[in-house]
Image (cartoon, rainbow, N blue to C red):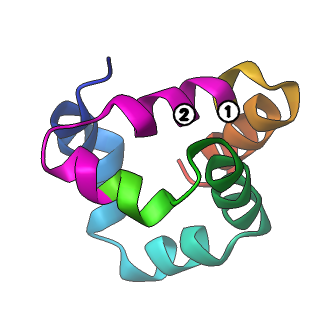
Amino acid sequence: MPNFDELFKGKEASRLMKDPSKLEKLRDAPETQKIFSMLSQSAGDLESAAQRAAKGDTAQLTDAIRHLMQDPEGAKLIQKMKENFQ
């Protein structure tokens, strides 16, 4: 199970959080919108899954992310986002 606290404290996340324009660009990117769509298909109510994850129950969100990463299209989208927003 991923450690979301460590993910958000990482160097890349820290740089992104300090750059509001880059964060907005990431939020509005077509890749991001497609990823959220794919996660919603896997997790059902994505907002509810995220709220449960914030409270410590990461199972549903973790499963949705795992499914996304195993999907060839999802893996390509994530790679493209990494390349565009580093």
- Kindly report the distance in space between the C-alpha atoms of the residues bearing marks 1 and 2: 5 Å
User: Who's the residue at 13% across and 49% down the image?
Assistant: 55
Q: Position of residue 29 (x, y in %)?
A: 70, 70
Q: Considering depth in this image, is 54 or 24 the residue closer to the camera?
A: 54
Observer able to see residue 45: yes
Relative to 77, does residue 18 appear above or below in the rendering? below
Q: Quadrant of the N terminus?
A: top left
Dominant secondary-structure state across the stretch colored magenta: helix
Q: Are marks 1 and 2 in contact (CB under 8 Å)?
A: yes
Q: Position of residue 82 (x, y in %)?
A: 61, 41
In the image: residue 3, left or right of residue 65: left
Q: Considering depth in this image, is 12 or 75 the residue closer to the camera?
A: 75
Q: Quadrant of residue 64?
A: top right
**Residue 8 lies in the magenta-colored region:** no
Q: Give the label on residue 20, or none.
A: none
Q: Single out the residue that lies furthest toward the front.
A: 44
Dot 1 corresponds to which residue?
68
Observer able to see residue 14: no
Tell me the crowding category of disc 1: few under 14, some 14 to 19, or many 20 or more residues within 10 angstroms, Cα based.
Answer: many
Q: Which residues are magenta?
A: 51-67
Q: Give the label on residue 65, or none.
A: 2
Q: Name the secondary structure under disc 2.
A: helix
Tell me the crowding category of disc 2: few under 14, some 14 to 19, or many 20 or more residues within 10 angstroms, Cα based.
Answer: some
In the image: residue 83, left or right of residue 55: right
In the image: residue 46, left or right of residue 52: right
Q: Name the secondary structure under disc 1.
A: helix
Q: Amino acid at mark 1?
A: Leu
Relative to 22, does residue 31 appear above or below in the rendering? above
User: Who's the residue at 14% across and 39% down the image?
Assistant: 56
Q: Position of residue 26 (x, y in %)?
A: 57, 67
User: Who's the residue at 86% across and 35% down the image?
Assistant: 73
Q: Amino acid at mark 2?
A: Ile
